[in-house]
Image (cartoon, helix red, strand yellow):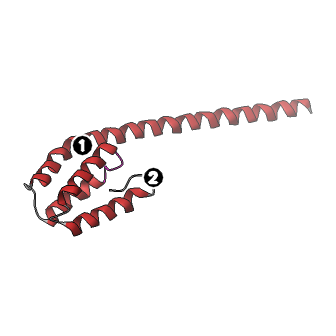
Amino acid sequence: MYEDVLIIKNENNSKDIECDRVINEIVEFIGVLAAEMQGMADRALIDYKPVAEDIITGRIEGENDIGYRLDFMLDFCYDDRVLALYKKVLRSLVEKYPALVVDYIHAYRDMWENEEEGQEDL
């Protein structure tokens, strides 16, 4: 009977060790994934700064052309720096393309608002 208790405890310890190993692997994977996302946001910021400047200065015009670029920028608005750039572009478009701005404010909210509760309004 005592041997049975030892076997059960040993099995439980093995399960605990395996569970800890799996948890550690998951945490490590999440860390790698987070680092990759940050790297993608860094690259997006570099790529979209000149595009944003072209929109703001009027070198890129037309709702379709602007919207095309905003669609890609929106994907990276989980990063505060890209979000700030996105907001700057939208603010520059308010007078000339108000409907477009409203559409992209809603697009941002639909995509990111639930995940970033408390985010200030655009």
Quarter that holds the N terminus? top right
Q: Secondary structure at mark 1?
A: helix
Q: Is residue 7 left or right of residue 117?
A: right
> What is the chief secondary structure element of the magenta stretch?
loop
Query: Is 48 located above or below residue 11 in the figure?
Result: below
Name the residue nearer the viewer: 32 or 17. 32
- Residue 13: percent from the left, percent from the top? 73, 32
Cα distance between the residues tagged 1 and 2: 23 Å
Which residue is rendered at x = 28% and y = 39% of the image? 42
Three-letter amino acid code of the residue under disc 1: Leu
- Residue 67: percent from the left, percent from the top? 20, 62
Q: Secondary structure at mark 2?
A: loop
Q: Residues within 10 Å of mark 1 (few under 14, many from 20)?
A: many
Query: Is 73 located above or below residue 43 in the figure?
Result: below
Disc 1: which residue: 45
Q: Which mark is residue 58?
A: none
> Furthest residue to the bottom?
99
Q: Is residue 35 left or right of residue 24?
A: left
57 magenta-colored: no
